[in-house]
Image (cartoon, helix red, strand yellow):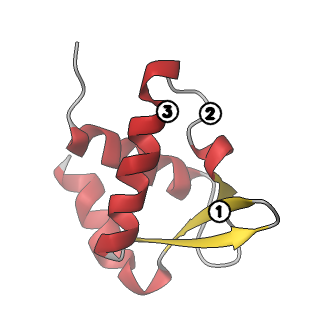
Amino acid sequence: MELSDDALKSWIIKKLVRKQCWGKGHISGDNLVKGSPPELKKRLLRIANTLVKEGNLVKFPHDSEEHYYLNPNRRKDIYKIIEEL
């Protein structure tokens, strides 16, 4: 069964909400895709970068890797995405 990009967006956002990654709380790209099938990992990172472009996630360099967190200024929009999907 092929998962849609919207379903994967929801999966990423729900994981970050569950782990309370708002602002100071952040997660590395490796940990973001942990728990997903190996064939989806590159696709999930691509979708995470799309969410960054949309403004729902923030990406920043930390040590030698990229870290992500939910944009606290877009909290209402983020919860709306979760409800819709």
Separation (CA) of disc 1 from disc 3: 15 Å
Q: Residue 62, relative to residue 43: is it above or below?
A: below
Q: Which residue is located at x 24 percent, y 65 percent?
A: 80
Per the model, the C-alpha gap separating discs 3 and 2 is 8 Å
Residue count near mark 2 (Cα–Cα under 10 Å), binned few <14, some 14–19, many ≥20: few
Reading the chain from its start, which is encountered first: label 1 or label 2? 2
Residue type at mark 1 is His
The residue pinned by badge 3 equals 41
Q: Name the image quarter holding residue 66.
A: bottom right
Q: Residue at x 76, y 68 (%)?
A: 62
Q: Residue drawn 67% across and 43% down?
A: 31
Q: Which mark is residue 67?
A: 1
Q: Amino acid at mark 2?
A: Lys
Identify the residue under disc 2. Answer: 34
Question: Comparing marks 3 and 2, which lies closer to the viewer?
Answer: 3
Task: Name the image quarter holding the N terminus.
Answer: top left
Name the secondary structure under disc 2: loop
Q: Nearer the viewer, residue 84 or 42?
A: 42
Q: Are marks 1 and 3 in contact (CB under 8 Å)?
A: no
- Mark 1 or mark 3: whose residue is earlier in sequence: 3
> In this view, which residue lies farthest toward the bottom?
73
The total number of labels drawn is 3
Residue most extreme to the front: 64
Q: Amino acid at mark 3?
A: Lys
